[in-house]
Image (tube, rainbow, N blue to C red):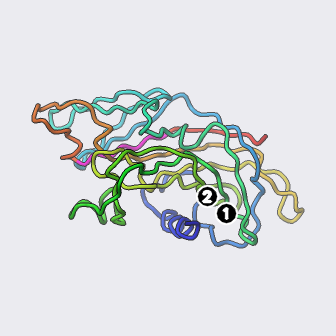
Amino acid sequence: MRTRTIVASLTLCALPLLAGARGDGCAASSRSPAPDVTGWWDVTYDDALSVEITVGGSVYTAETGAQGGAITITHQGRPLTFDLACARPEVVCPSEAWPRAIFAEQRDAGFEHRMYVTLPVQTCAGARRAPEPGTCGAGTANPECDDVCDGELITRDEERFGVIGERGRTFRLYLGAGVATNGINCALLGWSVADAELDTVGSAAGGDWEAVAMDAGLVTVGYSGGCLWAGDPDLDGEVEALILGATVKLTTGFTADRR
């Protein structure tokens, strides 16, 4: 599992989707020194969530409070409502995916840029099956054609992998995707990440290089699935997300201090 996660991180580090993010996820195999980040961190979040909704190639933006809520857009003349309340068990908002208190570890000898954090991760409580033909592959929410979850998605704590940038000034941690959506359940997409700038003291040469704060942080989580939608605007008995294949991106800023 660890090897697969590290390989995935090396692929994700170059995704154009995340080109504006603050982190640096491409130093997983570096053997150069990195600042010490091991220990507890207290996280403070912005008081708003930025929302980006993509429906049939059209992109809509909105903002909601830190706990999420209902967002309504008009697409091709139809009002479509998304239920993005963080209180819903199947929705892991940014401040849940990257909790208010985290414990980071560096434990791979010779690879100081690798870090591990235990975070809430989605898992499938039901059966898994192969995706339907034409619903996966390049350009879809399931590019690797992973098995999809036909049961309930639940959230449990699990270890995730992160990377400290080559210069020791940034980090990126992969919130990842545990399962793929079947079009109905609400699955976290694989490009979901937390990243930030690192405020450090000391130096590698002096042997006392350590990070003391995280600044300008961003947590970005992406979702796909009909569970986000509410209502049947054209009264045809179908949830529109199942037809349009909508995705949602939630972003919030954060800072953190080391205890």
Prevailing secondary structure class for the magenta stretch in the rendered image: strand
Amino acid type at image mark 1: Arg
Residue that carries the numbered disc 1 in the rendered image: 114
Amino acid type at image mark 2: Gly
Q: Quadrant of residue 52?
A: top left
- Please provide percent x and percent y for residue 59: 30, 43
Q: Nearer the viewer, residue 83 or 211?
A: 83
- Please provide percent x and percent y for residue 88: 42, 32
Mark 1, residues whose alpha carbon is within 10 Å: few (<14), some, or many (≥20)?
Answer: many
> Residue at point 24% right, 59% down?
135
The answer for how far apart the CA atoms under marks 1 and 2 are is 6 Å
- Please provide percent x and percent y for residue 131: 28, 61
- Number of the label disc, if any, that sits on residue 162: 2
Q: Nearer the viewer, residue 46 or 155?
A: 155
> Residue at point 77% right, 58% down?
35
The secondary element bearing badge 1 is classed as: strand
Q: Is residue 180 above or below residue 259?
A: below
Q: Are marks 1 and 2 in contact (CB under 8 Å)?
A: yes
Q: Quadrant of residue 180?
A: bottom left
Q: Nearer the viewer, residue 150 or 213?
A: 150
Was residue 91 drawn as part of the magenta stretch in this picture? Answer: no
Stretch in magenta: 245-251
Q: State which quarter of the image contains the N terminus.
A: bottom right
